[in-house]
Amino acid sequence: MAELRKFVARHEALEPFFVGVDLGGTNVKVGVVDDAGRPMSWLSIPTKSPAGPEDAMQRTGEAVAHAIAVASVKPAEIARVGLGSPGTMDIPTGMLLEPPNLPGWENFPIRARLEHHCGHQVTFANDANAAAYGEFWVGSGQDLASMVMFTLGTGVGGGIIIGDLAVDGHHSTGAECGHIIIEMGPQARMCPCGQPGHLEAYCSATAVLKRTQEALAEGRASSLRTRMAGGEELTTVVIAEAAEAGDELATSVLVETARYFGVGVTSIMHTIDPDGVVIGGAMTFGGTTTTLGRRFLDEVRAEVRRRAFPVLAEKTSIEYARLGGDAGFIGAAGLARLAHRKQHRIGNVER
């Protein structure tokens, strides 16, 4: 949502200030955020993961300094930095363990190295939980007491926020909502993690692409054949465009995806009983601005109504996320804010 990003000026911003860092396999997003969750600056740098984690943390430290300068803030006015990272991790020790999308970054003390390069205390978090906290703080979940966020993209991520607690789990693998099991029979699809039947194997962009390819291989009629014959690559964007135009095969795959997703949402609702569920990520089909996005959300809600306890189906909101790609760095800054407030023993924490 870069085209919609609005910045608050230094003279209008509320102190203290925080920096959020959203580490991805391709890019690192960095921004200064004020105490009300409003961005004051933003920039993106390439991760250059083959160069290794130390190189990335050095350049991220430089990006933090640049973002602070662009926000017209002094380094001493930054209370803390938040870092959201993908991959398996040990949050208490600040270690990145075995991130699948960052080969060669295994067992790296990422929190300590970023602290070294940026000169500020760093709060370390799972990137999906950081994005969830961003939506909880100033996005679609800002009126909720508790929230589960799913991110639909290449994989399926998750974040759980209860009160002002991001559920990291005892072993730093909490809220892995994409890996709940929705199918356990011999026909269960294989998840990229190597286990069968996980939600990610049915509801990720990768899964949508695979099921569409299978349907085409079975000989089903579709306008997608014409587009592919014309040299277009089959992607989830192309599938979504075909569905929006009324293609029966593409529509059926995405409706089926929504129903699978509704099963996963119901399982989480029965486990957590959250105030609301928020759906984000790249595969939200334009959200409520498109017919397909509205249809997808309606199908998810309908599946939840069919499967959930009636009181949950009636009272749990299910909405799209608002912050887009900004949720990660805003949420990382928000988690840094929480840690700062707790460290300084501020009484009742207000969002």
Image (cartoon, rainbow, N blue to C red):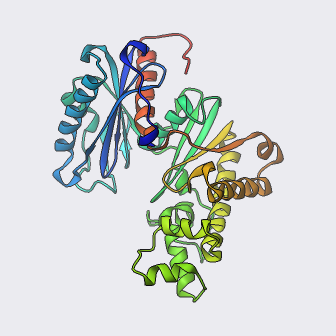
Q: Horizontal placement of 57 versus 90: left or right? A: left
> Where does residue 44 sit, x and y in percent of width and height?
30, 41
> Where does residue 229 sit, x and y in percent of width and height?
44, 84
Residue nearest the viewer, comparing 332 with 17? 17
Q: Horizontal placement of 284 versus 260: left or right? A: left
Tell me what residue is drawn at x 46 percent, y 22 percent: 338
Quadrant location of the N terminus? top left
Q: Horizontal placement of 223 versus 230: left or right? A: right
Tell me what residue is drawn at x 45 percent, y 60 percent: 154
Quadrant location of the C terminus? top right
Asked which quadrant contains residue 50, the reply is bottom left
Can residue 170 be seen here?
A: no
Q: Is residue 157 above or below residue 215?
A: above
Tell me what residue is drawn at x 16 percent, y 51 percent: 51
> Where does residue 114 sit, x and y in percent of width and height?
24, 33
Q: Horizontal placement of 224 versus 258: left or right? A: left
Q: Is residue 41 above or below residue 75?
A: below
Residue nearest the viewer, comparing 246 with 74? 246
Extreme-bottom residue of the structure: 219
> Where does residue 36 sit, x and y in percent of width and height?
49, 20
Asked which quadrant contains residue 325, the reply is top left
- Label tally: 0
Residue nearest the viewer, comparing 220 with 50? 220
Can residue 141 be seen here?
A: yes
